[in-house]
Image (cartoon, helix red, strand yellow):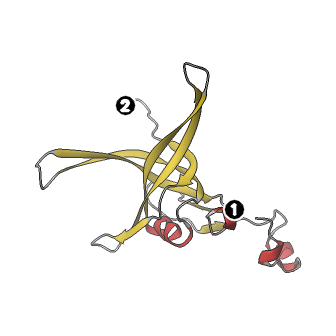
Amino acid sequence: MAKSVNKVILLGNVGKDPEIRSTGGGTMVANFTLATSDRFQDASGNWQDRTEWHNLVAFKRTAEIVRDYVKKGTKLYIEGKIQTRSWDDKESGQKKYRTEIIVNDLSLLSGREEGGSSGGYSRGTSSSSGSTAGFDQRQPSGGGDEYANQAEISDDDIPF
């Protein structure tokens, strides 16, 4: 079989507060939408903005991060894969389809005043099999001991 790739990279803003739920087996799931914008020139030469809405789904620890740090307006960098699921509508009996982005990596980009709760935090999985990596808080490149010996930094010192 030939090699194939299913990878999505998005940079946009959350459209509404995420919906958080748990499956019957106790797995946490976060559903939310992300808006991306594209600017183009129409036939009369005027610039137009076009917004595309993406349905996103995060599982397990990533869903917990979404629950704790993501809300309407939060700017996010997302890496994931496209998945389309189908089901039979109980009312009409028709087959329904929904295309979603399964989130594998999430970075919060918003500052506090922009709708996010923090900036520069990243959450990723080490593989697409659903294993979880730790919530990565970015530190200076000098190493842990040097970082610990630096002066205390308060929230007032952070520029965002």
Q: Give whichever of 53, 7 is nearer the camera.
A: 53
The C terminus lies in quadrant? bottom right
Residue 153 is marked as none
Residue for badge 1: 120
For the residue carrying disc 2, how many other residues have a C-alpha within 10 Å: few (<14), some (14-19), or many (20+)?
few
Residue 98 visible from this viewpoint: yes
Query: What residue appears at the point 44 percent right and 67 percent down from the top-left corner?
Result: 60
- Of label 2 and label 1, which has the lower sequence position? 2
Query: Residue 2: where, in percent of width, then height?
Result: 41, 29
The N terminus lies in quadrant? top left
* Residue type indicated by callout 1: Gly
Residue for badge 2: 1
Query: What residue appears at the point 57 percent right and 59 percent down from the top-left corner?
Result: 73
Q: Is residue 118 left or right of residue 103?
A: right
Q: Give whichever of 156, 57 is nearer the camera.
A: 156
Query: Residue 139: where, in percent of width, then height?
Result: 76, 66
Classify mark 1: helix, strand or loop.
Answer: loop
Q: Is residue 153 left or right of residue 32?
A: right
Q: Quadrant of residue 24?
A: bottom left
Query: What residue appears at the point 54 percent right and 19 percent down from the top-left corner?
Result: 43
Q: Give whichever of 144, 26 is nearer the camera.
A: 26
Q: Is residue 17 left or right of residue 153?
A: left
